[in-house]
Structure formats: structure tokens, C-alpha cells
Image: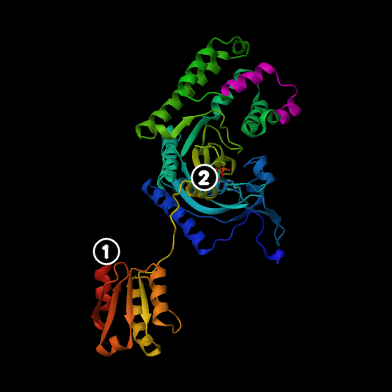
Amino acid sequence: MASFQTLPGFREFYPEDLARRNHIFRLWRQTAGTFGFAEYDAPVLEPLELYKAKSGDEIEAQLFSFTDKGGRDVALRPEMTPTVCRLVGAKANALKRPIKWFSIGEFYRYERAQKGRLRAFYQFNADIFGEPGVEAEIELISMLVQCLAVFGLTKDDFCVRLSDRNLWFFFLEALGLDEPRVRAMLTAVDKLEKAGDDAFAPYTAEFGVLDPSLKARIKGFLEIKSLASLDQLLTALNNDPEINKVAGPADAVRRFDERVVEMRRLVDGLTAMGLGDFVAIDLSVVRGLAYYTGFVFEAFDKKGELRALAGGGRYNDLVKKLGGPDLPAVGFAIGDVTTGLLLEQRGLMPTMISAPDVYCVIGGEAERLAAFGDIHALRAAGFRVDYPMKEVAFGKQFKAAAESGAKLALIYGGDELAKGVVKIRDLTDRSEREVPRAQVAAQVRDFFSAS
Ligand code: HAM
């Protein structure tokens, strides 16, 4: 049977698994609604070109790609961001700004299987287009927090780590690195936590030996975990002889200073929303994707046991790169795999059974036809109704009714029907009463509107 198993990293969803997934999606969708985001969707199969050089080397290496029967090079989408940029870019002038959009869909990456990382997974993506200021970051980071808090997770369970690629650029440029070196260095920083000093290998392979003082400075920069330490760094930069060697040091420090002011506005906004405890500055976050241009952020579980829960940031150039107008953008995606694991760990994933409201206990074939009229009428009125498909002993039916999780049982026995009544049993307190057949639907409705 081995050949009929699922492919590695792909999941099957039995009803109880799907109920859990739907629970997550329902609360994400509800959260997006409360923030005023509109839902969209797009194809799962895209031209390969859409991801080449746009998503970055790491994602490009993980693509599920092939040539279709028409000779086109195509890929299963590994992420939504290039696609949503195309959608927005194509109609940018007709869309009311700011454009606040979200979507829930499946994505595919040929990753090495590990806890929290699969090859097919779902993401909730939320993006804002047309807003250049930190107001867009405030809106998205507060929504990200709510996308986790809505399940009952607290500041003790997760944290959003905030960083800024511009700060890194200004810092490394001030230290004399040109743009290709800065980019290579940020790739190294992205890997540093996992790979240690090996992360610098591609950089040194391309640009030669890494000056130990530069490495020490980078590691120092990584230690920054607060606005106060950024202020200290700014003072240090102002007096730094290394910086003063580089052309335009005053400019570098000024740009750096301006970014710190912006970061403070962002943090102040989130604090005013009451979310200060959920957000921490952490410059070790630089994000692996190629298109980010400013603030970046990732959400992690507080115990540090899981891979990232979510990630995002500003990407002001991507809409234009994909043929659209110059349109600033910020967004994030949160995944179902790590979110689900965290909810399970914290006991916050409800046990979901799709219980009927009403279970019909039916005496025999003659009573079955009488029951059918009520069953269909109740379903048409919106009640969830179940009944045994075959003739089964009464005792077994009552057991099935109790196990189903239904609140009410309707009993269609020969004696009852002869009297023109149906017995209604409240399955919670086991009380019973007889009601005339014509009143069954009304009685059921009354029961549920009262409970
Ligand atoms: P990302 O950091 O690649 O960002 O993915 C975001 C989230 O998707 C991760 O934090 C994780 O929860 C989930 N995820 C990613 N890969 C896997 C995997 N192999 N298995 C399970 N879960 C996974 C992006 O995708 C950006 N496009 C986000 C974005 C939207 N930026 C701007 N707008």
C-alpha cells in the first residue's frame, strides 16, 4: 500500500481535523472583518516567472514547479505576496485606498520536513496597499496580535518581534558596506540564530575575509532589544571613529535617527492600542524574503519551541517590479501549522464535533415515513437533524442520540403516532413530554430559542 500514502509534508483532513482547521479559519476571517479587510482569492498555479528573483533564493529553491502540457513553466504558489501585488497592480487606479485585503489559502514549498514545517500548509494573508506611513504597520501588527489573541492566547504565549531592514542598511552602509554586501550580510543575519557563524560562509565566499571588528559590531547590533538601546546606539554612532571614516557619516547618522523616530511612532501607536506587552524590538529579525524594504516583523511562541507563527513587513517596490504602479505596501501571513500546534499545546483547541440539534428515534418502517415530513421541515428551518438510516432497536437509537451530542430527541413510536403525538425528550435532563404532531416544528423552535 506504500505507494498510496500521502506525499511527505501533505496532510489529509479527517472531519475532526477539518473542524479544527475551520475553527482557526473562522476566527481569522472574523478578525479580518472587524479590522475592515475585504477577502479575495487567486489561482494556486502561477507562471514560474512570478517568483523568480522576486521571492528570493530560498523560496525559489523550494518551488513545486513543472512544465505544463502547453509548454509553460509553472509553479504551485509558495506564498501570496507576488500574486496579490499583480491583482492590486492591475486595478490600482480603480480601487479605493487604502486597499485592505485578506485571503486564506493553501501554499506549497518543498521544505525539509520538520516540526511546524510542511510542504502544503495554509496561510492567512493580510496586506495594505497605498499607505506609506507607519499607520499601515500599526493596523497590521495589531491585527496579527488579534489573530492569535482571538483564540485565548495571551502575552505569555506569544510575542511579535519588530525590526527594520532600513536600520540595518543605514548601519552597515555607515560601516562602509556597499549594497550587495549589505544584502549578503542580511542573509547571513537571517540564518545566524540557526546556523551560528556558518551563516557568514556565503558572505566570505563572495566578498572575502570578514573583519572581526565588523562581525563584533553586527553581533552587538543583534543584541538590540529596545528603543532605549537604539538611542544608546545612536549616541555611540555619533561618536564612532569608524563611522566617521566613511563618506557621508553625518547623513548616515541622520537617516538612522529618522528611522528610530519612525520606529518610536510605530511602538507608541501599538502601545496606545494596549498591545505594548505583545511587541518587542528585536533586530535579529531581518526576514528571508527578497522584497522587504522597511519594517519587518515575526510572531513567535514565547517558549521558543516552535518555528515562526507569522511573518511580514513593508515591501514598497514589489507592485512596481511586477508591472504595476508605484504603490507602497505592507503585509503579513500567519500559518495554520504552527498556530494549530500552539493552540494544542496550550489546551486552547476545542474538541469539535459537529453535533446535530435534534436526533429522531424511529420505531419502524411505518413510523419512518411519518418522521420524514418533520425531519425535512426542521432541516429546511435550519435545524441540524439526524436519524438512523436503518431500522435499529430503540435502545441502540437512544444510545446513538446521546452519543451524537444532540440536545433533543424526537421519538416516533407506533403508540405515539396512533395518538397523533410525538414524544420530545430533553437529552440534557432526560425530561419527556408529548406534543401533537402538527406542533413539532414550533416546539423545537421554542426549545432552541429559549436555550
Ligand atoms: P513567510 O515568513 O515565508 O512569509 O511565511 C509566513 C508564515 O507562513 C510562517 O511564519 C509560517 O507560519 C507559515 N509557513 C511558511 N512556510 C511554511 C511551511 N513550509 N510549513 C508550514 N507553515 C509555513 C510569507 O510567506 C510572506 N509572503 C508574508 C507576507 C505577506 N509578507 C507580506 N505580505
The residue carrying pointer 2 sits among few (fewer than 14), some (14 to 19) or many (20 or more) residues within 10 Å by Cα, namely: many
Q: Quadrant of the N terminus?
A: bottom right
Residue 97 screen position, x and y as percent: 41, 43
- Spot occupied by residue 203 in the image (x, y as percentages of width and height): 71, 28
Nearer to us: label 1 or label 2: 1
Is residue 177 on the magenta stretch?
Answer: no
Tell me which numbered mark, 1 or 2, is placed earlier along the sequence: 2
- Residue 278 location, quadrant: top left
Pick the residue in front: 226 or 5. Answer: 5
Residue named by callout 1: 451
- The span shown in magenta is 200-221
Magenta stretch: residue 207 in it? Answer: yes
- Measured from the top left, where is residue 110 in percent x and y? 67, 50
- Quadrant into which the C terminus falls: bottom left
Cα distance, mark 1 to mark 2?
39 Å
Disc 1 marks which amino acid?
Answer: Ser
Q: Residue at (48%, 51%) from the top-left corner?
A: 103
Secondary structure that dominates the magenta span: helix
| Beta carbon of the mark 2 residue lies under 8 A of ligand 1 | yes
Q: Nearer the viewer, residue 349 or 267?
A: 349
**x%, y% of residue 395?**
40, 79
Above or below, 58 against 44 in this view is: above
Residue beneath the point at 52% across and 42% down: 310
Q: Which residue is mark 2?
A: 333
Q: Examine the image and state in which quarter residue 8 appears.
A: bottom right
Left or right of 5? Residue 415 is left
